[in-house]
Image (cartoon, helix red, strand yellow):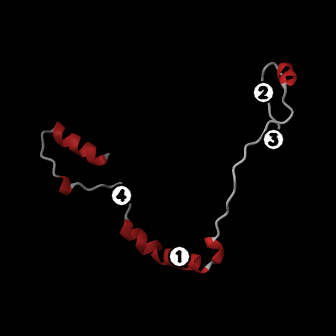
Amino acid sequence: MAFHYAQLEATAFREEFDPATFEDHTLPKNDAIRKKAGPLVKEWVKLLREDKSANAVIVQSGSKRKPVGLDRDSKRELGGILTFELL
């Protein structure tokens, strides 16, 4: 968006816009991040590759909860408000 606004500003002031000179301040500073966290990330990757449980995939099927103890009579008693008990 900053690039877009820089173009709009240049257009509004009737100035020439050079995309090569645009500096985006919202981009992360990757060099600084690699310098500070690089060794830690490399060690973490090494530990993950050595850990056999990191390759395990847990398969779980989805399930929906079913309402418990709800029928038409209880709905009328509650004045039309539905309530559910958690399992």
According to the image, label 3 marks what residue?
86
Cα distance, mark 1 to mark 4?
Answer: 25 Å
Q: Secondary structure at mark 3?
A: loop
Query: Which mark is first along the chain, 3 or 1?
Result: 1
According to the image, label 1 marks what residue?
45
Going by the numbered disc 1, the residue's amino acid type is Val
Going by the numbered disc 4, the residue's amino acid type is Leu
Location of residue 51 in the rendering, given as x and y in whole percent from the top left corner: 62, 78
Query: Which mark is first along the chain, 1 or 2?
Result: 1
Q: Which mark is residue 82?
A: 2
Drawn side of residue 56 relative to residue 23, left or right: right
Location of residue 11 in the rendering, given as x and y in whole percent from the top left corner: 17, 39
Location of residue 64 in the rendering, given as x and y in whole percent from the top left corner: 73, 43
Depth order, front residue of 45/14: 45
According to the image, label 4 marks what residue?
27
Determine contact: label 1, label 4, CB under 8 Å: no
